[in-house]
Amino acid sequence: MPSTLNIRLGLMMFLNYIIWGAWYVTISTYLTTTLHFTGTEAGAVFGTTAVAAIVSPFFAGLIADRLFATEKVLAALYAIGALLLFAVTRVTSFGAVYGLMLAYCLSYFPTIALTNSLAMQQVKNVANDFPPIRMMGTIGWIAIGLVVGYMGVEAQATPFLLAAGASILMSLFSLTLLPHTPPQASKDPLGLGALVMLRKPAFAVFIMASILACIPLTFYFSFTNAFLNDAGVQNAAGKMTIGQASEVGMMLAMPFIFRRVSVKGILVAGLLAWTIRYALLAIGNPGSRMWMFYVAIALHGICYDFFFMTGQMYTDQEAPAHLRGNAQGFITLVTYGIGMLAGSLLSGVAVDFFTTTNGRNWQAFWISSSAMSFAILLTIMIFFRTSAKIRQRA
């Protein structure tokens, strides 16, 4: 039976990922279909998430680690975010949307590292307790995706309003139900001490591969919903929650996998799944090959958990005890920040590059993603030399 604390932490993740999932999958559809932004413009707006992820570890280090309790910082960030999300629904120009989304993401993305860090500080055993807690975030993502798909509002501003409402609820939850997590008075508020971990060759290769892997990953997050809608797939947002459902299954299996498979083996399997996924999107269709779309979406659990959850826990394991909080900020910076910024910009450019007078050449778009994933897979196989497994830590 999960403890009362673990239930509260799980609910924290559930609400936090409802906020993100409400708008993240459908934003490019809204921007290109309703506001008629170009692919490059939509990619730039999507890239505000990555810009924020680069800045957020520094914010968390300066504010949460030194001045205020984590739960109070979270409450303030969610309240500010709710106001900004509402404002996004009131503007239509590229400059206004970009500015407001950048401001919003600067308020939201610190919550990813902060909620991860809060949960890892509070649980007794990270390897056993954290995956089920984090799994609740995926369930929240599924729930809101089904709601958005059922409502048929993928091309409307409604998802932003749903996220704003969840943000207000999460602000109240942070103040009333989250465990008190005081600042740690870190001597390294910017988290730069985590750079010392790059002296380990295996960890340095892992970080490089993580940055590169986020590029094809962002191709998927940025434009899969728009692609499926272009292809004529009905209720695309709802069908995309199949990926999060598979993620739940993978999260439940992760403690078992950690005991039996090395970190390298898990990463290789995840990248192989990415390579296959993009190939299936390239050759599938909404008719006789619709099953290929379903399989591609269902591979999300392996694609995401085998790389990102494993990466977060590998980072926590490799970090010295006094740098674990900073290390989570660092891995957030290089993945959600640097990697996804590059991916967001390149995905928009790629969509425009593969667009002709006859429409978008989605097949070429997805083949390029598959090729990138395979190249990163080879990098891990050749250069990531470690037999380490994720260990239990009391």
Image (tube, rainbow, N blue to C red):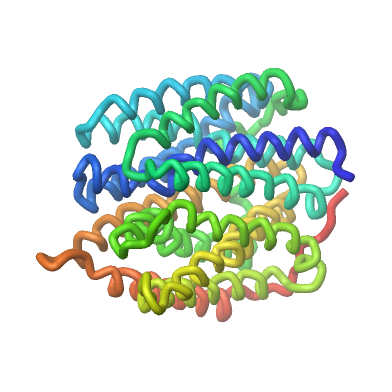
Return the residue nearer the eye: 109 or 367. 367
Residue 151: % across, % down? 44, 41
Q: Is residue 205 visible?
A: no
Residue 327: % across, % down? 64, 46
Is 371 located above or below residue 58 in the figure?
below
Is 90 located above or below residue 113 in the figure?
above
Residue found 55% across the figure and 60% down from its top: 243
Residue 264: % across, % down? 66, 72
Please indicate whether residue 290 sits to the left or right of residue 353 in the image.
right
Please indicate whether residue 266 sits to the left or right of residue 23 in the image.
right
Q: Is residue 374 visible?
A: yes
Return the residue nearer the eye: 21 or 325. 21
- Residue 310 in which image quadrant: bottom right
- Residue 89 in which image quadrant: top left
Residue found 39% across the figure and 44% down from its top: 152
Please indicate whether residue 393 sits to the left or right of residue 203 in the image.
right
Residue 356: % across, % down? 13, 66
Return the residue nearer the eye: 162 or 43. 162
- Residue 372 in which image quadrant: bottom left
Is 165 located above or below residue 126 in the figure?
above
